Amino acid sequence: MQKYLTGLEHKEGSIYKVNLIHNMPFDQTYGLNKSVQELELNGVLVDEVVEAEQREGFASIMYVDKTTKEITYEYVEIPLTPEQEALKKIKELEQENANINYSLMMGGLI
């Protein structure tokens, strides 16, 4: 079953960022009631959508080559929330404190 990639934003050459996937463009009930030619004016029909890898701390952005219909992904780092930044800093300070205590203990000062 073909899928329809649309909401395309031009990146470079024939590469476009995909913002919307319609999984049943030709379905009698949920389809778009348009021909292949009409759909391809604003998007790309593909037979299969390769899923993105799940990477911790990264978001995936789907791209499609309108000429070859090849799907690729770009992975962008998700910025930490203020809470995550604070937790990261606390862990760093705790580790630093443990290192200082160990150095003092090994030096006979504790």
Image (cartoon, grey):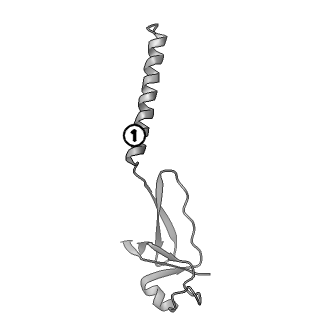
Outermost residue, front direction?
83
Give the answer, above or below, for where 72 lies relative to 90. below
For residue 62, above or below residue 91: below
The answer to whether 31 appears left or right of 82 in the picture is right
At x 43%, y 8%, the residue is 109
- Number of residues whose C-alpha sits closer than 10 Å to that of mark 1, classed few (under 14), some (14–19) or many (20 or more): few
Tell me if 28 is positioned left or right of 102 in this view.
Answer: right
Could you tell me residue 10's position as x and y percent?
37, 73
**Outermost right residue:** 1
Does residue 12 appear in this view? no
Residue under the image location 47 percent in, 87 percent down: 39
62 vs 6: above or below: above
Identify the residue at image location x=47%, y=51%: 57
Quadrant that contains the N terminus: bottom right
Local secondary structure at mark 1:
helix
How many labels were placed on the picture? 1
Could you tell me residue 101's position as x and y percent?
Answer: 45, 17
Is residue 64 something one can see in this rendering? yes
User: In the rendered structure, which amino acid carries the disc numbered 1?
Assistant: Ala
Q: Which residue is mark 1?
A: 86
Residue at point 44% right, 13% down? 104
Residue 20 in the image: state x and y as whole percent: 47, 74
